[in-house]
Amino acid sequence: MDDRLVILGSKGGPAIRPGGPNPTSMLLTLGGRHIVIDCGLGVTRGLVETGLSLKDLDLVFITHLHSDHVLELGPLLHTAWTTGLSKPVTVYGPEGTALLWHNFLVSLDFDIRTRIADEGRPDLAGLVIVREYGEGPVLEEGTMIVSALRVDHPPVTDCFALKFVQAGKTVVLSSDTAYFPPLSDFAAGADLLVHEAMLPEGVESIIRRTGNGARLREHLYASHTLAADAGRLATQARVKKLVLNHLIPADDPAFTEADWRQALASVWSGPLVVAQDGLAIPF
């Protein structure tokens, strides 16, 4: 299969609404590897819809432990197991990922023990290897190199942008972050930069709908990146293609793709993709 990124969930934040997109998850196919990045609600169904057999799960990367990035990690691995997974899957995540996985196994202990005894399945715990990472090198395997950059996503400290390099191709994912200029060096010359994005008008719309007022506004502006700033960073980094993802807002019909493109019109002149669930992006 050709190198591509499939957006499985394009929404920023954990809430879901009728007919709206799913929270964050992606499938990166690179050099023949199938790499799941983040596991928000809907990741399992989204993967199946791409045509990937869950038995072929290979690598999973978690950028940070907010629920819209990890809520379906355990269910994804469990569902792959019930589908016939028989070879190990390695999960890379920040500190706390191993505890998250352990507690999922505890919560499903009855089901797992019952299926092992009744259906002859292998022990699920033995099929999942969790490796916790910090800033710097994460994985070097064959011709693939993965590295991490700590980004600015308060109050979360362990939140990481990820860079995948394989056979001359580079893909960088910002994770959740406020505008963070060091990302331009980290992503320099990348074939694909996937960056979170927020519309200021959309923030006000969200506040009106949720009623959290000034506190929510303060969090969003302290922890996330305006779309225009994502475009500025992509220009500074001279990336070949920019993808806006983890959209805030992503499920408000008052805002369309035209609004996102208009927000970047003066700061980014290269190829631009505005994420949608199920969208496949070749590079």
Image (cartoon, rainbow, N blue to C red):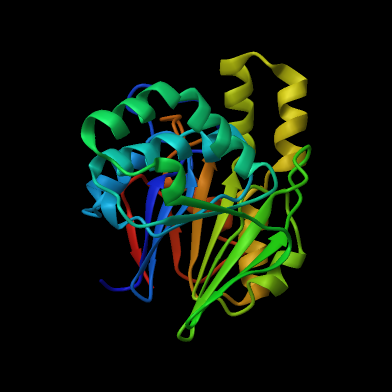
Give the residue displayed 64% in from the left and 59% down from the top.
Answer: 161
> In the orientation shown, which residue stands out farthest toward the bottom?
168
Q: Is residue 230 above or below residue 204?
A: below
Q: How many marks?
A: 0
Give the residue displayed 67% in from the left and 41% down from the top.
Answer: 96
Q: Is residue 223 above or below residue 134?
A: above
> In the orientation shown, which residue stands out farthest toward the front?
117
* Residue 23 point in image, percent of width and height: 47, 37
Q: Is residue 65 visible?
A: no
Q: Is residue 219 above or below residue 166?
A: above
Residue 156, quarter of picture: top right
Give the residue displayed 43% in from the left and 59% down from the top.
Answer: 273
User: In the shown orientation, is residue 221 left or right of residue 57?
Assistant: right
Q: Is residue 167 visible?
A: yes
* Residue 111 point in image, percent of width and height: 36, 24
Q: Nearer the viewer, residue 265 or 218?
A: 218
Q: Nearer the viewer, residue 116 or 172?
A: 116
User: In the shown orientation, is residue 177 left or right of residue 71?
Assistant: right
Residue 185, quarter of picture: bottom right
Q: Quadrant of the C terminus?
A: bottom left
Q: Quadrant of the N terminus?
A: bottom left
Q: Nearer the viewer, residue 48 or 18?
A: 48
* Residue 204 point in image, percent of width and height: 64, 27
* Residue 75 point in image, percent of width and height: 40, 34
